[in-house]
Image: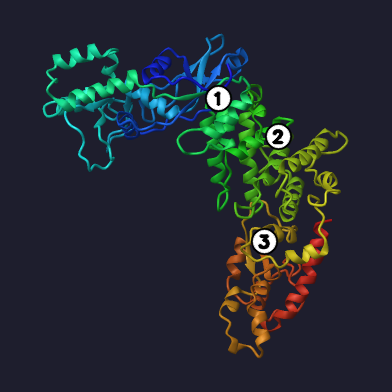
Amino acid sequence: MSSGFVNPITIKNAIDNIVDRSYLLPAIQRKFVWSSDQIEVLFDSIMRGYPINSFMLWEVKENKVKNEFKFYQFLTEYRQFFKEDNPDIDTKGYKDFKAVIDGQQRLTSLYIGLKGSYAYKMPRKWWYDNEESLPTRQLYLNISKPLPDENERQMQFDFQFLTKEDIAKKSSTTNWFKVNDILKFENTNSLDNFIEENGWLSQTFTKETIRQLRKVIFDERLINYYLETTQEIDIVLDIFIRTNSGGEPLSFSDLLMSITTAHWKSDARKEIPDVVNKVFAIGNPGFLINKDFVLKTCLVLLNDNIKFQVKNFDQSNVIVFEQNWDRIKKSIIETFKLLSNLGFNNHSLRAKNAAIPIIYYIYHRGIEDDINSPVKYKEDKLLIRKWLCLSLLKGVFGSQSDNVLTGIRKAIRAELADTSVSHSFPLSRIKDEFKLNPSKNLSFEEDFIEGLLTTRKDASECFPILSLIYSHLNFGNQDYHKDHLHPASYFYNSKKIDYKTEDDFKFYTDPLNWDSILNLQLLNGALNQSKLDTPLFDWVTKNKIDTVNQLIPNVSLNIIDFKTFLEERKKLLVSQLKKMVL
C-alpha cells in the first residue's frame, strides 16, 4: 500500500486503537503539553462541527524499526509535574502498528477526555503528589443548558474537568454527564432508552446534546489522516519536522534532541539542560550555550562524522555518548571555567564553537580534573588563549564550522598520537592545517592588523585583541578589565570652546581615537581601581606603573599631546601584534 490519505475513521475507532496499543507515539514526539482548558475547547469544537484538522500516522511494519527505535504508549492519567511522561513499550517482536507523526496533542486530549483523567495543582497548595494538592479530574459535560452567548472562551457546550467533590456540589442545580459514559451507548436505541429512563425526553437541550455527543464519537468519521508507509526512518523524520502539530515548528536540533533522549537510558532531558545551566553560571555575563552545542560536542569528541544528521544519533552512538557522559560533562564545564579564568565571557566569546576544540583537547588529553589548577598546564593555557584569540579575530568559525572543527580535531589527534614530543595544545599544527585556506588561515596581513586597532571598547572583538596584545600578562585566575589610558570622561566632557581649531575638537572627540584599541589597555582588578578617571600622566607617576609592561609609549602623557601619543602607540601595538601572530 502506498502512502496517502485513507478512509477516515471515527473518534471511537481511534480510541479503540489507542486502547489496544495499535496506535503508539514515536520517541521523537515531545511531551503532552495541552492544558485542561484546551481539551475542553477541543470537545466543544467537535460538538459544534468545527474541523479539527487532519492527522498523520506512520505504518510501522519492519522489525528493524521496531527493534531499533523507541516508542511510547499514550498518556491516560495526566498529573501535572508528577505524571507527564508517556509509558514505555517494548516493540521488539511486537505486532504491526501505527505511530502518530502529527496529531499527538489532539489524540491524547481525546483519549484523556474519554478514557482518562487530568490532575493539575490547586492554587496555594504545595507540590505534593496527593489528592489535596492535585485532585483527579474527569471530563464532564453540562447537559442542563448551553453556555451564555457571551463567555470568555467563546464556547457553546460547557465541558469541564471536575472532581467527584465538584460534581456533588453542582448536581443540585445542574446535570453533569461524565463524557466517558457515552462509550456505553454503541447504538442509538440504548441511548434513547437511557434518556427515557432519566426523564429527559421533554428536555430538548439535554436530549439533543447527549445525542450529539454520541454521534460525534460513534458515527461521524472525523479522524481524517494521511498514512505514511515508508520504513525509511530519515524520510519519516523529515516529514515529522515539517508537519509537527501545535503550530510551533520543531527545529532539526529539537528532533535530534528527541532522538537522543529516546536512546539515552537515563534522563537526557535533565542531563543536557543541567550542563547548559552550569555553564551559564560561569563568567560575568555567564556563557550561553544550548543543547545544539552539547550535541555537537558529543559528535566531535566521539564520532568520526560530526554533521547534524539523524544517522549520527542512532542508538549505538547515543549509547557511547551516555557511557562517557560524566567525562564529557566535566570537560565542557571545566573548559568554560578555563575560558573565564583567561578573561573571556559570553560577550567576548562570540563564536561558541571555538570552545569545542578546547573541550576536545582537554577530554582526550585526560586533564579535565586539573586543567584549572593555577600551577599546572601553563604552556597549554598560553597556547589555547593565543589560538582562541587568533581564531575569533579571523572569524574562522563564521562559516563551514564542521570543516573547521574536523581540521582542528585532525591536528589535535596528530599531536596526541606523537609519542616523540611532550604534548601541548597544537597551535603550530593547527596553523599548518589551514595555512593554504585563504579564509580560515591564522595569518594576519598588516592592513588587517591596523584595522583591528580601530576596534572600540564595547565590541566583542575588543577583549581578544587586547588579550593578544597583553599576552605577557598572567591571566590565570585574575580578573582583567578593559580600561581607557586617557580617561573617557575627558573626551565625554569636551567642548568645542576648549580647542584652538575645529579639527582638534573633531580629533579629540572621535571615538575611533579615544575609544579604540589605541587608547585601551588591560588591567587587573586592583590596578583598575587605582586608575578610574585619573589622568594618564598622574596615574603612571603616582603608581610607578611599568610603562613597558603596559605598552605605554615613551612620549608625553599629557592630554595636550594626545595626537602624538596615538601615533606612537599605534607603532608599538602593530609591532606587538605582528610578534603575536607569527
Q: Does the rendering let one see residue 360?
A: yes
Hey, what amino acid is under mark 3?
Answer: Cys
Residue at mark 3: 462
The residue lying furthest to the right in this view is 420
Alpha carbon separation for disc pair 2 and 3: 31 Å
283 is higher (above) or lower (below) than 330: below
Give the quadrant of residue 255.
top right
CA neighbours of label 2 inside 10 A, class few (<14), some (14 to 19), many (20+): some
* Closer to the camera in the image, 77 or 374: 77
Disc 1 element: helix
Q: Nearer the viewer, mark 1 or mark 3?
A: 1
438 is higher (above) or lower (below) than 29: below
Give the quadrant of residue 421.
top right
Earlier in the chain: of badge 2 and badge 3, it is: 2
Left or right for 38, reference 98: left
* Closer to the camera in the image, 575 or 272: 272
Hey, what amino acid is under mark 2?
Answer: Ile
4 is higher (above) or lower (below) than 294: above
Hey, what amino acid is under mark 1?
Answer: Ala
